[in-house]
Image: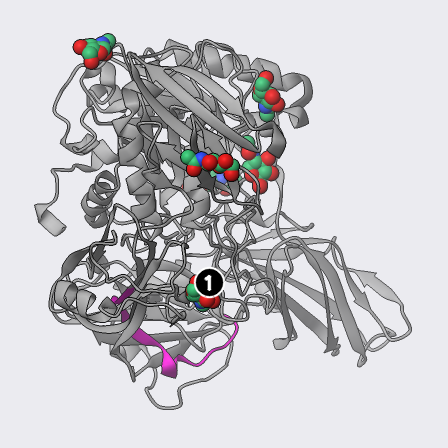
């Protein structure tokens, strides 16, 4: 899209898209929970134009028990979360356009507190929220001022943790409500997961399914603020995957049962650049298996399958928001398992047939006609006669991407990150930046969220009479986060990191004691701080008392009350900023390149890949560290942390309730091998600098720069009075790998023919598509020759086409 996109300024996006808790979570005075604030849903009156293109309309936003009302008219709103720090401003126009093309009416974002106010002030919620609201008012962004913002949220999921705050919870909630109202935005405020929120605050639902959600009162509409399209990923976890069929099922059911506003969390997940990922242990990629993938490309079939649903729901807006609702239950299948819902308004009707049985396709009779509703699906009949959409029947292509090598065989220079230590001498004049305390301090407090790294250093003096002198001793301690590298008298005696969902562990290592001063240095590293839960801000990190030296005779010395030296950050990151140092003379090599050695800095240059395709760094064979491109921190990497070998379904069944480790993929592989380098981080012409800090040890020789390329598309669509649109998204369809109209089986990349097939399957696709960028196939029986022996089952078109 580039410059040709809709006119967009930073402030518009920034303000109309909205919420956030600070990931840094340094104790912020009187803040009870995280005090995060979701500001708004930016809305466009015309579903075909984006909020950004919206010219000044003064909109009055109100609500009643059924829906949000825009200028007095009840509306259906399909919205999606796109969080602006997880992409670059250059990506925003195309993300917004893809959201609009996907049939969304609105976009939601957090206002990232940590991004706008990285350091602490007092009375925090009030100051920050007032500041943001005032900025929005100044830019006239609220609908009441002619802007695109139609809703704002105060706090986030406080209701889920309120019980942990005892008697303080209610006054804090009431304070939020009063405060929000006092801001006079002219648009309604919502609170999610807050059933006790008093009106005029609208209580909303977050979850994978919100069909069974009941409003706290019949005078507010049913709103779903976080419909989780997938899930985030942790280091050590496989890729989460939520099927298009299941997301569509959840959305259709929500509208079947009187929902009128829903928001996808996420619509575009994106990337946690720099140190912004929370968790702990949330990966740098925040793809979320969202309808737009990390790079902003449509994630098919999810994007297209939901788009069809949005357009259909929108076409029924009047009837759904004003109509009388009646439900017909099929008692033979159990209450609510199978239900036909009819909305009736001014002589027009629409019907939803919902089957929540996760195993059985159910046959129902409705007004004399028979229908089969597949298991775990909703059929929508805009005239109550013909099924035009079923959530389980996907008529959208699947996109298959590959990573294509652009630059390989990089030539590297290197440097060493020095291990810090304090010695006797330094006690008198400590190294720069070291502070002392006679106790173990909390890492989060000491680093003040300026670095992942904190050096803990101490010494112990032993004379020849000491019983442990000359002996192998054991160093033992407990740490609450997340990685430890331990050195005894300058020698590395072990590294360890938190695993298996626990963020703390015991460290045990051995070292040899010498005469005089013995130095102990521990480098502790965090990988995203706790950002959810009651009192999450008070969850500390780092080495815990006691730190023991255990002699062979089991005699122990506790070092916790020693004089400890603290140094925040690494020499190369915070002090020298080596990621900006492009001067080859300051680096060693390319000879004697250290391989699999800890604490090494690597530097190289590479040419910008041609074209417009997204660029990724494949950090294969690297360990853990941070990567910078032209000084931009593209995030933490941890290629050596593999996901569990188990836990991936070979066959993903969309039926039945989703949970975050259902239908996972990529087991037993690096949990993240590819790291997004937004094109705006690259120089248009010429060389780019790539710098890696490798903490554990890795081999940079196989690191490569790649582009993410759409290489083929597939579809598996049932026959019917509908069309199948196929597109190589700007590329050309060059070759048919597979095409069969009949009863073939399998999945994209592994289709196999059934026993019945139309003889003109391949030639039809050949004629319609090959050599073209897109084509449309009529799925009715007119297109494909009938074949005897196919039986009465519906036939399917399975197709796989190469793009180039
Ligand atoms: C919502 O209300 C319906 C009807 O009163 C009830 O059957 C259902 O259990 C309620 N759902 C929840 C989650 O409380
Ligand atoms: C109801 O339907 C009639 C006839 O189709 C139409 O003229 C009228 O405008 C409709 N009323 C409303 C309130 O939509
Ligand atoms: C619907 O199914 C019932 C039961 O199988 C059958 O008796 C009836 O004839 C069917 N109706 C139509 C219109 O096919
Ligand atoms: C943390 O950093 C901020 C801004 O640099 C500073 O004002 C504050 O005093 C620091 N806090 C501590 C505990 O050092
Ligand atoms: C295809 O349909 C035929 C005829 O109904 C049937 O005999 C055959 O088992 C089917 N094959 C597959 C793979 O479903
Ligand atoms: C409101 C709601 O449905 N919340 C659910 C969201 O999903 C998680 C994980 O499946 C459940 O634990 C919540 O109850």
Q: Is residue 234 above or below residue 420?
A: above
Look at the image and say whether residue 597 sits in the magenta stretch: no
Q: Residue at x 33, y 81 (%)?
A: 413
Q: Which residue is mark 1?
A: 570
From this view, report whether residue 688 is shown above or below residue 216: below
Q: Work out whether 248 lies above or below 738.
A: above
The image shows residue 762 at horizontal and vertical percentages of: 23, 70
**Label 1: how many Cα within 10 Å (few below 14, some 14–19, many 20+):** many
- The reply to whether residue 37 is in sight is no
Extreme-right residue of the structure: 553
Indicate the quadrant where residue 684 lies.
Answer: bottom left
Q: Which residues are magenta?
A: 695-713
x and y percentages locating residue 583 in the rendered image: 24, 74
What element does badge 1 sit on?
loop
Q: In the depicted view, which residue is nearer to us: 5 or 371?
A: 371
The image quarter in which residue 129 lies: top left
Asked if residue 84 lies left or right of residue 3, the reply is right
Rendered location of residue 104, percent (x, y): 27, 35
Q: Is residue 696 magenta?
A: yes
- Residue 554, how many percent across, how many down? 89, 69
In the displayed orientation, state which residue is furthest to the left. Answer: 4
- Is residue 264 shown above or below 297? above
């Amino acid at each position: 899209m580039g410059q040709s996109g809709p006119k967009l300024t930073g402030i518009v996006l920034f303000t109309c898209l909205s919420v956030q808790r600070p990931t840094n979570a340094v104790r912020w005075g009187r803040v009870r929970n995280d005090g995060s604030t979701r500001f708004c849903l930016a809305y466009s009156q015309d579903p075909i134009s984006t909020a950004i293109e919206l010219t000044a309309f003064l909109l009055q936003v109100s609500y009643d028990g059924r829906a949000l009302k825009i200028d007095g008219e009840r509306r259906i709103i399909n919205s999606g979360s796109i969080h602006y720090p997880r992409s670059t401003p250059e990506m925003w126009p195309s993300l917004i356009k893809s959201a609009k093309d996907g049939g969304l009416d609105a976009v939601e974002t957090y206002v990232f507190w940590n991004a706008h106010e990285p350091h602490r002030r007092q009375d925090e919620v009030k100051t920050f929220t007032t500041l943001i609201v005032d900025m929005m008012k100044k830019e006239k962004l609220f609908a009441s001022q002619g802007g695109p913002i139609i809703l704002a949220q105060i706090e986030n999921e406080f209701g889920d943790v309120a019980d942990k705050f005892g008697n303080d919870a209610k006054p804090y909630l009431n304070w939020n409500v009063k405060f929000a109202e006092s801001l006079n935005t002219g648009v309604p405020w919502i609170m999610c997961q807050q059933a006790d929120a008093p009106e005029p605050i609208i209580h909303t639902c977050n979850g994978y399914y919100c069909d069974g959600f009941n409003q706290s009162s019949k005078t507010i509409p049913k709103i779903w603020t976080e419909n989780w399209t997938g899930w985030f990923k942790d280091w050590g976890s496989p890729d989460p995957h939520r099927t298009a069929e299941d997301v569509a099922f959840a959305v259709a059911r929500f509208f079947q049962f009187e929902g009128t506003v829903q928001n996808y969390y996420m619509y575009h997940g994106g990337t946690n650049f720099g140190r912004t990922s929370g968790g702990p242990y949330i990966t740098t990629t925040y793809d979320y298996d969202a309808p737009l993938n990390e790079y902003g490309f449509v994630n098919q079939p999810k994007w297209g399958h939901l788009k069809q649903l949005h357009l259909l729901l929108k076409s029924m807006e009047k009837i759904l928001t004003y109509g009388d609702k009646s439900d017909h239950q099929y008692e033979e299948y159990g209450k609510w398992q199978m239900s036909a819902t009819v909305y009736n308004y001014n002589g027009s009707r629409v019907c939803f047939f919902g089957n929540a049985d996760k195993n059985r396709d159910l046959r129902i009779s409705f007004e004399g006609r028979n229908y089969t509703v597949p298991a775990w699906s909703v059929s929508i009949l805009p005239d109550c006669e013909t099924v035009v959409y079923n959530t389980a029947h996907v008529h959208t292509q699947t996109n298959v991407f590959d990573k294509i090598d652009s630059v390989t065989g990089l030539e590297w220079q290197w440097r060493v990150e020095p291990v810090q230590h304090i010695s006797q001498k330094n006690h008198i004049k400590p190294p720069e930046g070291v502070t002392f305390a006679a106790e173990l301090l909390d890492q989060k407090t000491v680093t003040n969220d300026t670095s992942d790294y904190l050096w803990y250093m101490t010494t112990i003096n032993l004379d020849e009479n000491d019983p442990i002198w000359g002996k192998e001793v054991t160093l033992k301690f407990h740490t609450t986060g997340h990685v430890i590298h331990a050195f005894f008298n300058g020698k590395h005696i072990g590294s360890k990191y938190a695993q298996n969902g626990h963020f703390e562990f015991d460290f045990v290592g051995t070292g040899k004691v010498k005469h005089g001063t013995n130095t102990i240095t521990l480098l502790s590293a965090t990988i995203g701080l706790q950002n959810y839960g009651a009192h999450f801000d008070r969850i500390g990190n780092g080495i815990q008392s006691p730190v023991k030296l255990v002699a062979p005779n089991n005699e122990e010395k506790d070092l916790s009350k020693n004089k400890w030296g603290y140094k925040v950050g690494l020499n190369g990151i915070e002090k020298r900023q080596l990621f900006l140092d492009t001067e080859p003379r300051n680096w060693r090599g390319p000879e004697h390149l250290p391989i699999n050695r800890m604490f090494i800095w690597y530097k190289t240059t590479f040419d910008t890949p041609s074209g417009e395709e997204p660029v990724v760094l494949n950090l294969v064979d690297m360990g853990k560290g941070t990567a910078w491109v032209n000084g931009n921190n593209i995030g933490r990497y941890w290629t050596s942390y593999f996901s569990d070998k188990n836990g991936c379904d070979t066959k993903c069944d969309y039926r039945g309730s989703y949970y975050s480790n259902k239908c996972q993929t990529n087991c037993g592989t690096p949990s993240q091998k590819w790291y997004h380098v937004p094109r705006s981080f690259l120089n248009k012409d010429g060389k780019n600098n790539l710098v890696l800090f490798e903490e554990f040890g890795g081999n940079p020789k196989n690191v490569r720069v790649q582009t993410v390329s759409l290489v083929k598309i597939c579809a598996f669509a049932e026959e019917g009075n509908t069309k199948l649109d196929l597109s190589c998204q700007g590329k050309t369809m060059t070759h048919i790998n597979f095409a069969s109209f009949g009863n073939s089986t399998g999945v994209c990349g592994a289709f196999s023919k059934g026993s019945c097939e139309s003889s003109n399957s391949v030639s039809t696709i050949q004629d319609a598509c090959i050599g073209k960028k897109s084509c449309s196939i009529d799925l009715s029986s007119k297109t494909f020759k009938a074949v005897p022996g196919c039986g009465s089952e519906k036939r399917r078109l399975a197709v796989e086409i190469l793009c180039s």
